[in-house]
């Protein structure tokens, strides 16, 4: 499809926006009028700049408060439209967006609206331009696409068509199914936007909180599917008003924007394939989402000194030193199916990360049925592949760069639980120093993200890794709010938790200022008996975050809980959460270098969350240390 984006969606000057959009591979733009009004140059010059960058100017927007007006206002608006048509011809923009009237003067008369739009279309036709009519969700008399379509039909002019915007339809919970019945060539333009589900005034929601498809909660794929069923072949565009995008570096936003369209096309393509609906336009067709089955390893970036600290920590957590890498200063620790890799190799990727961010997690290893296909999917979705130097007799584990710069390796499932490590590591005596505390698997990895990275990560994990986001929660740190959202694969073998701090003063925010964002904040390890495991870990020297007695007093009033279990939890400092599907028992270690800490977790039944309700107890305890 012809991929386009509204200039309002990005930060920067108009020229910088165009450069970012072109670099991300877009075909065209929608020119937001304010961007042109403040542009130091003529319409013809703008047209040349866009042309030199390989971009078409697909739409000039918006013309406001036009239709259904008393005669004097209508005549003035026609005059205004003529001046905008002059500009459009000079810059080479073929279509103008006219959005439904919000003025108190607007008359509730669809026939009048149709007649006035007919006259506008007639003026446009004289210059071989077109006008598209869009229903705004807060339009005074026209707020639904169905109403706008009735007016367009009644106006009956070849140069007047409909413009669809997923935000206006989905924010009003209007049914997009009727779109499929509209003739595709009467839909002149398509704007796509997603959004989080919020209960607020629709205008405020639209102006500040839209996001790219795949970042929010709307069924944008279902909407797009209806437009394709209508036979639409025009531009697929993004019109995103978002406070955070307005300040995020525009190159990053443009990459997210392109990824969102590729994701949208590929998802819609799948829906239309069963049963097959013939498509007049080619939709993006990337390699399928890889089948992932949990985290195999976590790699720490370290130097010699912090590698020694991590060795002590691993011992306290019950990990055994398994071996040393064949060619690098890399050590492997293991417990159950969990592998911790400590990488202190000079001149390596890990060392670069260490020098930039201190001791921190620099890579995750995800088990995968087809690593090369996984990398193919990722690069198709605009992620970068990463190749590390490989020594003789070592395996190449394909990797990609995640947003923020850490690596995700795809570990071939076919190698079995330990195949990778047997190939790459000189294994030591497995029996030595066995402090096993019963830790089995990596339950989840929680990331601390800068505020402008949350939407990026939701889309990245969806489009590249096939993970689906869960509920978005707001948690109270003593110094501000944390927003937390889990993402997981279908069988829940791979879970990540994305945390952002809405305040500069929380512990999460302060960790970010050390690590630069996109950093692993804590790692949760699963066990079968949390009391037994916690006792062993304590005996090994692990220190846990102490929990206030008041927490347990309150817990008993909230949840009908066995008194014996409650007193065990109180004694051990174990936290508790219950959902209809099951229970979650967990405990947090004190943090070590860089603020990173571990969580030990036991899931009972089909509990499907992360004990987020208890995070405030941890954060408050950490703040009182
Ligand atoms: Mg719009
Ligand atoms: Mg957690």
Image (spheres, helix red, strand yellow):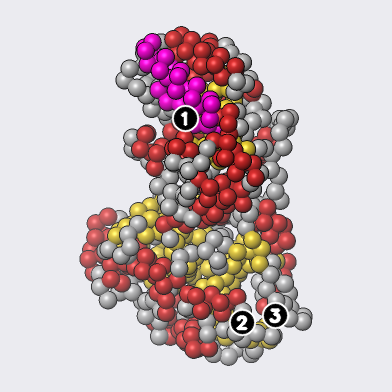
Q: Secondary structure at mark 1?
A: strand
Q: Taking the image as drawn, is residue 142 in sight?
A: no
Q: Secondary structure at mark 3?
A: helix
**Mark positioned earlier in the residue sequence (1 or 2):** 1
Q: Position of residue 147 (x, y in %)?
A: 47, 18
User: Along the line of sight, which residue is nearer the eye, 253 or 336?
Assistant: 253
Residue 326 % position (x, y): 69, 85
> In the image shown, does 405 or 100 lie closer to the viewer?
100
- Percent coordinates x, y for residue 66 in the rendering: 43, 20
Up-down relation of residue 540 to residue 590 (above or below): below
The tag earlier along the polypeptide, 3 or 1, is 1
| Numbered tag placed on residue 347 in the rendering | 2
Residue at numbered disc 3: 424
Pointer 3 residue Cβ closer than 8 Å to ligand 2: no
- Residue indicated by mark 1: 62
How many marks the image carries: the answer is 3
Which numbered disc flags the more N-terminal residue, 2 or 3?
Answer: 2
What's the distance in space between the residues labelled 3 and 1, CA to CA?
A: 60 Å
464 in relation to 388, above or below:
above
- Which of the 4 image quarters holds residue 563? bottom left
Q: Is residue 457 above or below residue 570?
A: above
Nearer the observer, 556 or 456: 456
- The spot of residue 583 in percent (x, y) is 41, 58
Q: Which residues are magenta?
A: 59-87
Query: Viewer-nearest of labels 3 and 1?
Result: 1
Q: Quadrant of the N terminus?
A: top right
């Amino acid at each position: 499809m012809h991929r386009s984006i509204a200039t309002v969606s990005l930060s920067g000057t108009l020229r910088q926006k165009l450069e970012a959009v072109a670099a991300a591979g877009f075909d065209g733009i929608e020119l937001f009028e304010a961007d042109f009004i403040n542009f130091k140059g003529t319409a013809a010059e703008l047209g040349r700049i866009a042309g030199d960058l390989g971009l078409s100017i697909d739409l000039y927007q918006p013309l406001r408060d036009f239709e259904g007006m008393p005669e004097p206002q209508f005549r003035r608006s026609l005059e205004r439209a003529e001046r905008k048509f002059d500009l459009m011809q000079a810059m080479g923009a073929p279509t103008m967006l006219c959005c439904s009237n919000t003025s108190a003067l607007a008359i509730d008369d669809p026939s009048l609206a149709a007649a006035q739009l007919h006259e506008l279309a007639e003026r446009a036709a004289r210059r071989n331009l077109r006008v598209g009519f869009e229903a705004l969700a807060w339009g005074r008399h026209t707020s639904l696409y169905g109403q706008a379509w009735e007016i367009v039909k009644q106006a009956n002019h070849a140069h007047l068509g409909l413009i669809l915007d997923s935000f206006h339809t989905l924010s009003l919970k209007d049914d997009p199914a009727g779109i499929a019945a509209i003739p595709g060539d009467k839909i002149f333009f398509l704007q796509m936007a997603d959004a989080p589900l919020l209960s607020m005034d629709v205008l405020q929601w639209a102006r500040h909180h839209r996001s790219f498809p795949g970042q929010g909660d709307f069924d944008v794929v279902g909407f797009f599917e209806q437009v394709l069923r209508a036979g639409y072949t025009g531009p697929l565009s993004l019109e995103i008003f978002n406070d955070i995008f307005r300040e995020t570096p525009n190159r990053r936003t443009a990459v997210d924007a392109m990824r969102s369209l590729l994701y949208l096309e590929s998802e819609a393509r799948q829906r239309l394939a069963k049963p097959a609906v013939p498509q007049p336009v080619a939709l993006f067709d990337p390699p399928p989402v890889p089948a992932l089955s949990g985290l195999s390893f976590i790699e720490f970036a370290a130097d010699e000194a912090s590698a020694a600290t991590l060795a002590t920590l691993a011992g306290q957590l019950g990990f055994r030193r398994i071996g040393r890498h064949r060619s690098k200063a890399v050590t492997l620790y293991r417990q159950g199916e969990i592998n911790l890799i400590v990488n202190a190799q000079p001149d390596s990727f890990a060392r670069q990360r260490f020098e930039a961010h201190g001791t921190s997690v620099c890579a995750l290893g995800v088990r995968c049925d087809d690593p090369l296909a996984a990398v193919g999917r990722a690069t198709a979705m605009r992620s970068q592949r990463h190749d590390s130097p490989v020594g003789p007799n070592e395996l190449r584990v394909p990797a990609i760069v995640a947003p923020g710069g850490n690596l995700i390796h795809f570990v071939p499932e076919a190698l079995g639980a330990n195949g990778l490590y047997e190939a790459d590591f000189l294994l030591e005596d497995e029996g030595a120093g066995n402090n096993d505390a019963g830790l089995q698997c990596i339950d989840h990895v929680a990331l601390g993200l800068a505020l402008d990275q949350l939407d990026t990560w939701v889309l990245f994990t969806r489009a590249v890794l096939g993970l689906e986001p869960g509920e978005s929660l707001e948690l109270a740190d003593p110094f501000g709010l944390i927003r937390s959202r889990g993402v997981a694969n279908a069988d829940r073998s791979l879970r990540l938790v994305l945390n952002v701090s809405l305040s500069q003063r929380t512990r999460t925010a302060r960790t970010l200022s050390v690590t630069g964002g996109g950093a692993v904040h804590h790692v949760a390890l699963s066990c079968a008996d949390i009391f037994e495991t916690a006792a062993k870990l304590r005996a090994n020297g692990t220190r846990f975050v102490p929990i206030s007695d008041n927490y347990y007093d309150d817990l008993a009033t909230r949840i009908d809980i066995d008194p014996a279990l409650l007193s065990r939890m109180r004694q051990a400092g174990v936290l508790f959460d219950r959902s209809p599907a099951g229970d979650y028992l967990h405990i947090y270690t004190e943090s070590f270098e860089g603020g990173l800490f571990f969580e030990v977790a036991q899931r009972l039944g089909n509990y499907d969350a992360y004990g987020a309700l208890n995070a405030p107890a941890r954060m408050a305890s950490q703040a009182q240390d």
